[in-house]
Image (tube, rainbow, N blue to C red):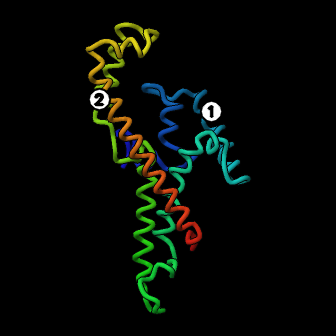
Amino acid sequence: MAKEGLTEADLTNNVWNKYLFVSEVMGKRFIHPWKLVKYIKRSLKWSWQRITRGFSDGDIWWMETYLQMLLPDMLQYLKDHRMGSPVCLSRTDKPEDDSCHEEWDKVLDQMIFLWRESYEYSSSKKNPYEEEYMEMLDNYYGKYGPNTGFAMMRNDPKYKKIADKYEKTEGEINQYREECKDKALDMLKEYFHCLWD
């Protein structure tokens, strides 16, 4: 599930990311040539770093995001292209029992789901008050200026109600994502030595 405006392709863990290209190079309607050159130069550098050392500077700058995107992508690829499954997941001790494949699919699906849910942009949980809250911020800062401070806005009854709803819901969503991350890490620990093909 992708955040509104972003597709799954935008969330692909890739130095040649379409979303980054649009956000860093495109103006409102046209490409800035100097930004394009800078973007290409950096992307080539990051590609070379991944080839020569296995990770790029960008991967380190956003390591948590990099891992939240990389792990489910790798797990999905393993699930789709694997040759076998851990025999320890078989329901019986019989050599002809192939139930381990079905069980391993369930484990991999659960880990993929949890990792995707732990990441803001791929999580299915979205704040229903976000659009209204952002409009409120634009309205407030447009009226009073960006240097008025968030605390002053919170004291204004017109803005307090939506801010309270947004913040309460955002806290619940963040807690859900943390729980997903913790469960995903627990599963990673449990099945770490099974991650092979």
Give whichever of 92, 75 is nearer the camera.
92
Give whichever of 95, 134 is nearer the camera.
95
Q: Position of residue 136 (x, y in %)?
A: 31, 19
Q: Residue at x 42, y 43 (%)?
A: 121
Q: Amino acid at mark 2?
A: Lys
Figure quadrant of the C terminus: bottom right
Q: Using the image, determine if residue 89 lies above or below residue 22.
A: below
- Answer with mark 1 or mark 2, whichever residue precedes in sequence: 1
Q: Using the image, determine if residue 122 lies above or below residue 156.
A: below
Look at mark 1 in the image and give the residue it sits on.
37
Q: Using the image, determine if residue 43 lies above or below residue 77.
A: above
Look at mark 2 in the image and give the residue it sits on.
165
Assess disc 2: are there few (<14), some (14-19) or many (≥20) residues with their C-alpha within 10 Å of its C-alpha.
Answer: some
Q: CA distance from mark 1 to mark 2?
A: 43 Å
Q: Secondary structure at mark 1?
A: helix
Callout 1–callout 2 Cβ contact below 8 Å? no
Q: Position of residue 88 (x, y in %)?
A: 51, 80
